Amino acid sequence: MRLVIATCSVDYAGRLTAHLPLAKRLLLVKGDGSLLVHSDGGSYKPLNWMSPPCTLSIIEPDEVQRSAGVSEVWKVTHTKTADMLVVSIHDIEHDSAHDLGVDPGLQKDGVEAHLQKLLAEQIHLLGDGHTLVRREYMTAIGPVDILARDASGASVAVELKRRGDIDGVEQLTRYLELMNRDPLLAPVTGVFAAQEIKPQARTLAEDRGIRCLVLDYDAMRGIDDGIARLF
Amino acid sequence: MRLVIATCSVDYAGRLTAHLPLAKRLLLVKGDGSLLVHSDGGSYKPLNWMSPPCTLSIIEPDEVQRSAGVSEVWKVTHTKTADMLVVSIHDIEHDSAHDLGVDPGLQKDGVEAHLQKLLAEQIHLLGDGHTLVRREYMTAIGPVDILARDASGASVAVELKRRGDIDGVEQLTRYLELMNRDPLLAPVTGVFAAQEIKPQARTLAEDRGIRCLVLDYDAMRGIDDGIARLF
DNA sequence: TATTAAATCTCGCGG
DNA sequence: CCGCGAGGTTTAATA
C-alpha cells in the first residue's frame, strides 16, 4: 500500500465522466493497483476511484501540462471495461509505502437473517395460535421468508425487511398471487414485517389486504448481546 | 487527516456487530473525527468505519489488554445513533498528519440524466410521429421520466433506466395505473426504455402491455465526447 | 457463472 | 427535515 498526499486534479471517464479541480488530497494505491482518492471529509466513499482489476502507469507530462505545473500524470485503466482515471499531480507532500500482508477479513453478524431466526422462534408475535411451517419456503419465483399457519390453520406468508419499503410489498404481492393459485395452500394471507415500515409501503400493503407488523429488534433479541457485549 | 499504519483488531457494534482479527491495516482519521479502516485489497469500501458525526477518544488499555499486547484503544462513538467502533492497537508502524483544506468537490456528468436528455431530444426513437410533452412530468406519486404523445395524439409515459429490472416495470405500472384514472390523459400507454433489459423484466412488462425499448447510449450521444475527450 | 436481494449502503434532490 | 430514487452503486448468497 502506498500513501501519497498531493495537490492534484482528477479526471474519470467510464460509465460517467467526472472531474475534480486542483486541490490537496490523499491518493491511496493498493497492492492490486487500485486507487482511491480521498478528501478530508465526506463518508467512507472516496471522491473518485478505480476498482481492481486495473493497472496504474506513470506518465511524463507533456509540455503544456508541465508549464501548467503538472509534475506527474498517473493513468489508471480498468482491465475489462476500459474505464479510465487520470490523476494530474502538481506537488507531492508525503509519499510512503507499507507492506500490510493479506487481511483475515471481516466477521459479521447479519441483520435480516438474525431477524428471521428470531421471528421464527417467537412466531407468536404474528398473533395468538400461530405456528411455524418453515423458514425460506421455496416457490417457483423465490423463497418466502417465513410460512406459518394461523389459529384456524390458514396459511400465512411473511415477508421480512429491516426497512419496509414499497418494493418489499410488491415482492410479497407476487408471492401471494402465486401461492393463492395453489389449492393446497390457498387461501394465503400476507404479513409484511419490518423494524420500520414506510407510510407509503403501509398504505399500499393495507390496500392489498396485507397486514403490517413492526418488529422491535432489541426486544426480540434481548439486551444480552450486541453493544452490551463490548463492555 | 491522520494516517496510521498499525497492527490492530477492530470491533463494531451498532446496526450489526462485526469483528476484525489482529492484522496490519491503515487507519485513516478524517478532520471531522470519522475513521476508515482499510486493508491492502478489496474495493473502495473500508473493512470497517465510522461515519460523521462522531467523536474519537483514545483510552489507556486496562491490565488484561496491556498484557495481550494492546498499547492504545481508540473508541469512536457516533453522536446520534450510539453506534460504536473500538480499535485495539498493538504496534504502530507509521503515523503522520496532513492539512488538506476543504475540497472543491466532484463535478459529474450523470448517466440516467444524460440518457433522459438525449431521448427527449431524439424522441423519434419512440416511433414515427412521436412528440415530447415534457421531461419529469409530475404526478401524485412522483415524476414520470418522459411524457410524450404518439402519432395519434395518445399519451405515452416513458420510464428510463440504465439497466431495466423488474422494479422499474413495477414503478412504471404504478404510474400508468394512476395516470389512466385521469380523464385528461387516458389512455396512457407505457414504454420501458433502458440500455439493457433483463429477460424477466421484459416478460413482466410485455405481459402488462408495456412496450420495451433498448437504447444504444453510444449511438445516441455520438462518439464525440466521453472518453475521447480526454485525449 | 449469472441473477437476485441486501447494505453499518451513500448521495442528492424536492417537497 | 424527510422521503424517494439513483448509484461508476458494492457485496454476498444462490441457482
Image (cartoon, coloured by chain):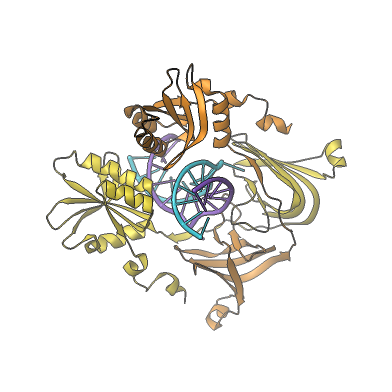
Chain colours: A yellow, B orange, C purple, D cyan
Quadrant of res A73 = top right
Q: Which of B226 and D11 is in front in this view?
A: B226
- The mark tally for this picture is 0
Give percent across and percent down for residue A195: 36, 60
**From the viewer's perspective, is residue B8 above or below residue B188?**
below
Q: Which of B50 and B187 is in front in this view?
A: B187
Q: Is A156 left or right of A111, judged from the image as shown?
A: left
Give percent across and percent down for residue B184: 39, 30
Q: Residue furthest left?
A: A152
Quadrant of res B156 = top left
Give percent across and percent down for residue A192: 30, 53
**Which part of the image, by quadrant, shows the N terminus of chain A?**
bottom right
**From the viewer's perspective, is residue A94 above or below residue A174?**
below
**From the viewer's perspective, is residue A164 above or below residue A139?**
below
Quadrant of res A16 = top right
Seen at 62% across and 34% down, the residue is A82
Give percent across and percent down for residue B147: 47, 30
Q: Is residue B40 visible?
A: yes
Q: Which residue lies furthest to the front in this view?
A: B184
**From the viewer's perspective, is residue A31 above or below residue B37?**
above
Q: Is D15 left or right of A4, judged from the image as shown?
A: left
